[in-house]
Image (cartoon, helix red, strand yellow):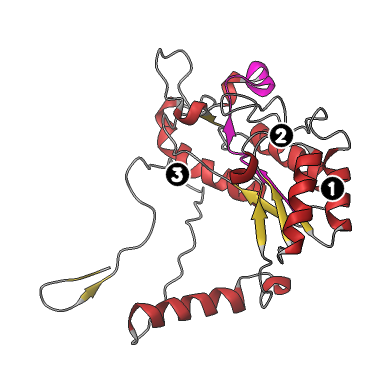
Amino acid sequence: AEMVETGRIRVNCGINPESFSWDLPRGDSFESPEVVLVYSGDGLEGMSHTFHDFYRENLMPEKFKHTVPPVLLNTWEAMYFDVTHERVMELARDAVKVGVELIVLDDGWFGNRQDATSSLGDWYEDRRKFPSGMAGLSKDINSLGLKFGLWVEPEMISVDSQLYAEHPEWCLNQQGRNFRCEGRNQLVLDFSREAVQDYVTDRLSDILSNANIEYMKWDMNRHLTEVYGNQIDPRKQGEVFHRYMVGVYKVLG
């Protein structure tokens, strides 16, 4: 929004036209993203309260409307990738003494994840670190009177992973080119692909249904580059970014 020289307020909203185009043949339809606008005569603070109230009362799930978030302790700064069942339990036993209510197991619990260079996409419990899996860990955490949460980064994939070995074409980049950006040692999965959506949904559903996980930290640690969908016609690459976001929303839904 901006105020022009005549004192009038102009508001622009909608899809950013940069890197966006959409082929819309006669008879087809396109659903644009939802836009929520609020007004307040009390400045930014008043606008923020109005915006938050609107979402709380109209869009937030009923069970969370008036819930006070629990006091949370995350394993990352304490352990980084060096997480095990016993180390997490040791942290939890100390945490409960100072009023912590929720323990979140961060990165390092899956695949062969020893550092930041591998295993994103391999969302299977590392039974060497967690012999009884997330089910056993969550049960032991709950026995202390604590809730249990888990970290994931579903939009990303490591080149050094079982998933990449099986499906290198699932990444956002143009296959056959000599250069691609592996920011943070990782690539981005192409969520415009239904197969990617199904894979991530199945893996997360399996994890969540087999353990008492009451909180999930969905991380997204790098921006999108080389936004090219290898299953989409080259003339329609302007649709990929939008289709990617629709795919992410489908998984979240």
Which residue in the protein does label 2 denote?
199
Say which amino acid is labelled 3: Leu
- Residue that protrudes farthest toward the left in the picture: 5
Q: Residue at x 48, y 17 (%)?
A: 175
Among the 4 quarters of the image, the one containing residue 73: bottom right
Image x and y of residue 96, in percent: 76, 61
Say which amino acid is labelled 2: Tyr
Q: Report helix, strand or loop for mark 1.
A: helix
Relative to 2, residue 149 above or below: above
Which tag is nearer the camera, tag 2 or tag 3? 2
Magenta stretch: give its range.
Answer: 148-166
- Tag 1: Cα neighbours inside 10 Å, few (<14), some, or many (≥20)? few
Image x and y of residue 5, in percent: 10, 73
| Mark before the other along the chain sequence, 2 or 3 | 3
Q: Report helix, strand or loop for mark 2.
A: helix
Residue 229 in sight: no
Image x and y of residue 204, in percent: 74, 42
Q: Residue at x 75, y 44 (%)?
A: 88
| Mark before the other along the chain sequence, 1 or 3 | 3
Quick check: is 159 in the magenta stretch?
yes
Q: Residue at x 85, y 57 (%)?
A: 142
Which tag is nearer the camera, tag 1 or tag 3? 1
Among the 4 quarters of the image, the one containing residue 117: top right
Task: Report the disc number at residue 24.
Answer: 3
Give the distance between the C-alpha atoms of the residues marked 2 and 3, in whole angstroms.
29 Å
Which residue in the protein does label 1 denote?
209
Which tag is nearer the camera, tag 2 or tag 1? 1
